[in-house]
Amino acid sequence: MNKMRLRFAPSPTGALHIGGLRTALYNFLLAKKHGGTFILRIEDTDQQRYVPGAEQYIIESLQWFGLTPEEGPGFGGSYGPYRQSERRATYQQYARQLIDNGKAYYAFDTPEELDAARQANPAFRYDASIRQDMKNSLSLPADAVQARLSGGEPYVIRLKVPANEQVVIQDLIRGEVTFDTSELDDKVLMKADGLPTYHLANIVDDYLMEVSHVIRGEEWLSSTAHHVLLYRAFGWEGRMPQFAHLPLILKPAPESFLHKDNTPALARRLAEEFTKKNPGIAAAFLEKAEPFILQVLQDKANIAANLKEKEKDEPQKALLKAFLKDSLFGKLSKRDGDRLGFPVFPLSWQGESADDAFVGFREYGFLPEAAINFLALLGWSPGTDQELFSMDELAEAFSIEKIGKSGARFDIDKARWFNQQYIMKADTAYLADKVRPFINAHGHQPGDAFLHQFVELMRERATTLAEFWENGYYFFEPPKAYDEKNARKRWDPSRSGLFGQLATTLDGLEPFNADAIKASVEGFIQDSGLKFGEVLPLLRIGLAGTMQGPAVFEMMELLGRETSVGRLKQAFLLFDAWAAQV
RNA sequence: GGCCCGUUCGUCUAGGGGUUAGGACGCAGGAUUUUCAUUCCUGAAACACGGGUUCGAUUCCCGUACGGGCUGCCA
């Protein structure tokens, strides 16, 4: 058997979403497992939707996750170019071939005409039953066609889909899927701008690049019949790749992200989006929209049922319901992350407009291997109880047969759990490296030794890299606030002098390390007759401002003598002042 | 609407004609811990429904319901 060749073929229309990344991962894993080749191909045939920077974003994302292509733009390979915009002539040539052998035809219908036809009849389909009535090289006399062509009239090339044939697809995940060609339209192969559509380009490239397996999202399943027809039209059916259509990643279950405290905010946000999207709607209706949304969201268990269209719904309400249904259910979209406060992109993205900005897994504080592990298990299962996998282990265990068939809901809590697992077991220097940017972002440049100790102290208490800072900022700067309630409860002003002595003792302690501090504090407790619980929490609050955090003695060691003693003295003064206020 | 795909705890899933239907996240309770976290223990929680086939169906078949995708000169 020939070498396995798999491609990831994204379109540079914006940030690459996590579903696309999983597709890339599965392609990569299969290639790795079988010693095959992982190819990156940029499908930039849509000039309208092209977004500058998107290609670079895609490549950076793949690399951050360790999914480096062996072939692709900038990666070498002997099947290039790997950017479809650079392969125009090739597609033209193959399109011409289909015209010549009668498998495709020229069509002159304008976009406006087609729009009108769809308006008039929503079920309109450009197919065998209707193409004689349209303006194309099949319905028009040959000389008229020639005249239009040589006159420079815009045209597209369409696939001539035969009527009443069966197309049977052997999908590696779904098994046999059958389509009747009478249900298929004459897909546009070449657009008026001279660029191919996805359908033509992907078949020509997969053939030319000798792609052996096409693993892609389920949204492509329906058009796979067209693709098979194209392979037939070219006479390439014998070399058709194997198909595997992945289930989609769905939005999280509403029950999982709807809480009492965030529901009103979400309702407002949805109302705003709805307003923005439908500028024509009457203000009076808009006023009622938010309460309605809130009501729907609050009845968590029946959201879907309450969004069902009813005959008596006024058009505006039907519109709102449809909008909510799209916003709350179905496949994961870029808006979801923003709305729900978790990342759905690998890396942060800043588009042209302020609206077009998203936080990535990286910036949210994920370790790439954790994100990979999470993604791998979203839709695929090893069949064992193992949950934690390195990339090598994934490649080893991976198989298409074990990919699930149904859509998987995105679950940020599970993702965070994976991250926590990786944070806990990561190598210190590596972890410190990953944490450093999050500390730097707040204006601190710790040395390696300090950062390493910090990371060791905090790693069991952080589920994201960002939380190292959020929960441990006081190692870098004075506490922003003190847990006043607990301090007041535990501070007895009559012991103020006693605590003052402790601070002084600590100030003279040599060496100033956790063991010595511990011994010293324990001695103090013994001598003073106080209890552990009457001392430690106060030290903790004095040092960190909060009751939470690593062991007090280790905390002091890392903070150092001067900072520790200084903070304690200052805090004791503050506690005294609170006590004096009564 | 039409076509296609799917359906095991709230979520990710294992399993498969006879099982106490297993694991993980999350949730609840408990133990350890000066706090938090970690760790450990315990608990609640699922085979969408209706018909077949069968001695027996959650597992196979058919319908229904529900969910999802596609239905562009987008990918």
Image (spheres, coloured by chain):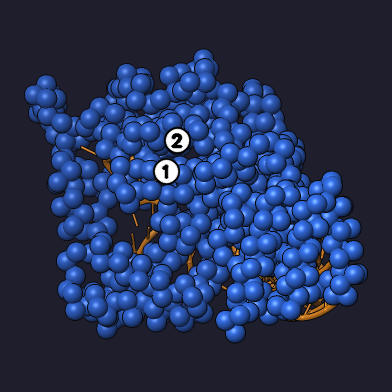
Chain colours: A blue, B orange
Task: Kindly state the secondary structure of the residue where label 1 is placed.
Answer: strand
**Quadrant location of the N terminus of chain A in the rendered image:** top right
Q: Nearer the viewer, residue A1 or A79?
A: A79
Point 68% across, 42% down: residue: A451
Viewed as shown, does residue A443 lie left or right of A46?
A: right
Q: Kindly identify the amino acid type of the residue bearing the numbered disc 2.
A: Tyr
Whole-percent x and y of residue B19?
85, 72
Instruction: Report if the CB atoms under discs 2 and 1 are less than 8 Å apart.
Output: yes
Viewed as shown, does residue A180 lie left or right of A483?
A: left
Could you tell which of marks 2 and 1 lies nearer the N-terminus? 2
Whole-percent x and y of residue A334?
42, 52
Q: How many other residues sit within 10 Å of disc 2, few (<14), some (14-19) or many (≥20)?
A: some
Whole-percent x and y of residue A62?
54, 35
Residue A182: tell me if it is visible.
no
**Quadrant location of the C terminus of chain A in the rendered image:** bottom right
Question: On the image, numbered disc 1 is attached to which residue?
Answer: A349
Q: Nearer the viewer, residue A243 or B75?
A: B75
Q: Kindly identify the amino acid type of the residue bearing the numbered disc 1.
A: Trp
Residue A540: tell me if it is visible.
yes
Point 74% across, 65% down: residue: A500
State the image quarter where residue A276 is shown: bottom left
Parent chain of label 2: A
**Disc 2/disc 1 C-alpha distance (Å):** 8 Å
Point 35% across, 68% down: residue: A270
Question: On the image, numbered disc 2 is attached to which residue?
Answer: A57
Parent chain of label 1: A
